[in-house]
């Protein structure tokens, strides 16, 4: 049953307004003290504002391409650098990239989401049933952020994190234990969501379409489950099948995306990195361009500029002259490029994997694979005829493409994750495919994880040492708990 208390709330505001007006006439010392309160910098921030900031900060951090903050497109070998090559040669620690990323995720994302939940819980103007959906929505975004951090580092501060001065040296929790807790939390959030109840004021993702939030929760549960396929196969199957029956993202309309605005202040972060910076630091990598050229992939005119045709990728991990190579596609220089954190294509490929593992998830591995390619191409506006031609290629068709099922799936999955560098890199880690190259300058192996922040060594050394020992050493070649093969 829907609930409407607008009339009551208006009456409540009128009464409160009258009381405030009367109190201002009293001229007590307390009233004079209140004149020193800055209304533009409130002591207490509403929960919906904190939620908005946490969500946008998550999209911004995962979507930018600053070499000081986010180098995932480079690690996935979809882009490479021109003048500066430290990042494409995986000199990650000296740039302080792990420090910056962990700090932004804990402070700008997870801290704000935690405070949003606390503010909503404490808001006396909200009835209990008005808090249900907002709290569940916050939990879903929190789960996404926590998984990303585990998938980047392994063991991380979790159960004792975000306590501020109450605990400045939090312990590191086991990554698998965190995953299990995240599965519980996202399942609870899914079950709490109720379309008959109010949503979150200022929902900048789904505009309070609770059915889409439920699909996101189920899809996130499914993604967590599929990451565990090699590490915990029984648990993986249980949660994957549960998530499938809950109802996953089923079209590009359900994607977990953020529509950036046509202005400088709220433009996609790539606009600042590629346009406002005035720099020419990146070109598509030869690793990526060569794969797409071999397949005559119709996404090339979107992913790449036409300044060089046939398309020529910059040498991965070497110095590259910007004008000598194919440039990044024009759409990635626009203010209104959508931020994308989870989509129909990703879920489709994961369903294909699940079917190969004999999970009860409906259709066939081939059908889901085809669905994943189609979803990616439709997202980028590729004409239907070109999609059909591509799918009919013997080196694309699921039954005739070369390699094992993992190799066939991984290549198309990795391509579809263009502009989602972290997930493209995760595809390579999960399936050990497609083949990536050693960087030209140093031939440093592709990382399996990021090393822990140097700041943590200085401020939380004992717990960091224990975490490093638990995962098998704090190196870029240490595999995560779910990366078994």
Image (cartoon, rainbow, N blue to C red):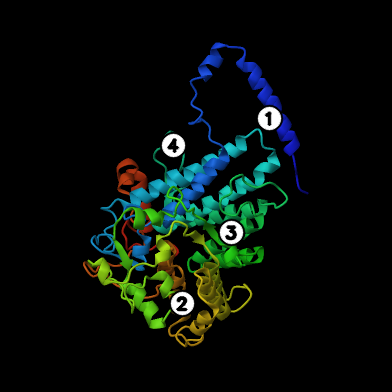
Q: Which mark is residue 374?
A: none
Q: Which of label 4 and label 1 is nearer to you?
A: 1
Q: Where is residue 106 in the image (x, y as percent from the top left)?
A: 43, 46
Q: Is residue 220 left or right of residue 427?
A: right
Q: Which badge, 2 or 4, is on the more N-terminal residue? A: 4
Q: Which residue is drawn at 24% across and 62% down?
A: 85
Q: Which badge, 3 or 1, is on the more N-terminal residue? A: 1
The 10 Å Cα crowd at callout 4, few under 14, some 14 to 19, many 20 or more, is few
Residue located beneath label 1 in the image = 13
Q: Which residue is drawn at 58% across and 79% down?
A: 367
Residue located beneath label 2 in the image = 406
Instruction: Specify the quadrant that holds the C terminus.
Output: bottom left
Residue located beneath label 3 in the image = 216
75 or 480, nearer to the observer = 75
Say which element carries label 3: helix
Residue located beneath label 4 in the image = 164
Q: Position of residue 457 (x, y in %)?
A: 31, 46
Q: Which badge, 4 or 3, is on the more N-terminal residue? A: 4
Distance between mark 4 and mark 1 Cα atoms: 35 Å
Say which element carries label 2: helix
Distance between mark 1 and mark 2 Cα atoms: 60 Å
Picture layout, residue 82 above or below residue 61: below
Q: Position of residue 239 (x, y in %)?
A: 59, 63
Q: Is residue 305 left or right of residue 173?
A: left
């Amino acid at each position: 049953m829907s609930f409407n208390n607008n009339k009551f709330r208006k009456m409540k505001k009128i009464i409160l307004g009258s009381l405030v007006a009367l109190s201002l006439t009293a001229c007590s010392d307390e009233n004079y003290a209140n004149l020193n309160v800055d209304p533009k910098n409130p002591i207490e921030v509403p929960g919906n504002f904190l939620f908005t900031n946490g969500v946008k900060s998550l999209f911004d951090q995962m979507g930018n391409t600053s070499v000081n903050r986010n180098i995932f497109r480079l690690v996935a070998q979809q882009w490479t650098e021109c003048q500066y090559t430290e990042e494409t040669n995986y000199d990650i620690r000296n740039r302080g990239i792990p420090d910056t990323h962990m700090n932004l995720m804990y402070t700008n994302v997870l801290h704000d989401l935690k405070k949003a939940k606390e503010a909503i819980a404490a808001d006396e103007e909200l009835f209990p049933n008005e808090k249900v959906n907002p709290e569940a929505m916050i939990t879903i975004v929190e789960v996404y952020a926590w998984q990303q951090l585990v998938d980047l580092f392994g063991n991380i501060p979790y159960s004792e994190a975000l306590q501020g001065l109450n605990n400045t040296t939090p312990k590191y929790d086991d990554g698998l234990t965190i995953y299990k807790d995240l599965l519980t939390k996202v399942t609870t959030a899914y079950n709490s969501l109720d379309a008959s109840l109010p949503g979150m004021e200022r929902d900048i993702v789904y505009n309070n379409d609770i059915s889409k939030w439920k699909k996101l929760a189920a899809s996130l549960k499914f993604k967590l489950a599929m990451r565990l396929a090699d590490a915990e196969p029984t648990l993986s199957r249980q949660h994957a099948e549960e998530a499938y029956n809950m109802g996953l993202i089923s079209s590009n309309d359900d994607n977990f995306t953020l529509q950036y605005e046509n202005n400088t202040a709220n433009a996609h972060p790539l606009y600042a990195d590629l346009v406002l910076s005035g720099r020419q630091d990146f070109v598509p990598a030869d690793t990526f361009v060569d794969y797409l050229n071999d397949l005559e992939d119709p996404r090339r005119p979107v992913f790449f500029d036409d300044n060089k045709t046939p398309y020529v990728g910059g040498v991965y991990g070497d110095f590259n002259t910007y004008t000598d190579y194919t440039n990044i596609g024009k759409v990635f220089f626009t203010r209104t490029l959508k931020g994308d954190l989870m989509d129909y294509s990703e879920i489709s490929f994961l369903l294909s994997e699940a079917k190969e593992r004999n999970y009860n998830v409906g259709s066939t591995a081939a059908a889901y694979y085809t669905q994943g390619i189609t979803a990616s191409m439709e997202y980028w506006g590729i004409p239907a005829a070109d999609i059909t031609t591509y799918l009919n290629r013997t080196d694309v068709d699921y039954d005739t493409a070369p390699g094992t099922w993992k190799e066939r799936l991984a290549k198309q999955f990795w391509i579809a994750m263009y502009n989602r560098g972290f997930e493209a890199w995760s595809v390579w880690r999960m399936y050990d495919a497609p083949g990536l190259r050693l960087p030209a300058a140093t031939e440093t192996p592709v990382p399996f994880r990021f090393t822990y922040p140097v700041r943590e060594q200085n401020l939380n050394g004992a717990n960091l040492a224990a975490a490093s020992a638990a995962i098998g050493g704090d190196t870029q070649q240490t595999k995560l708990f779910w990366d078994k093969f």
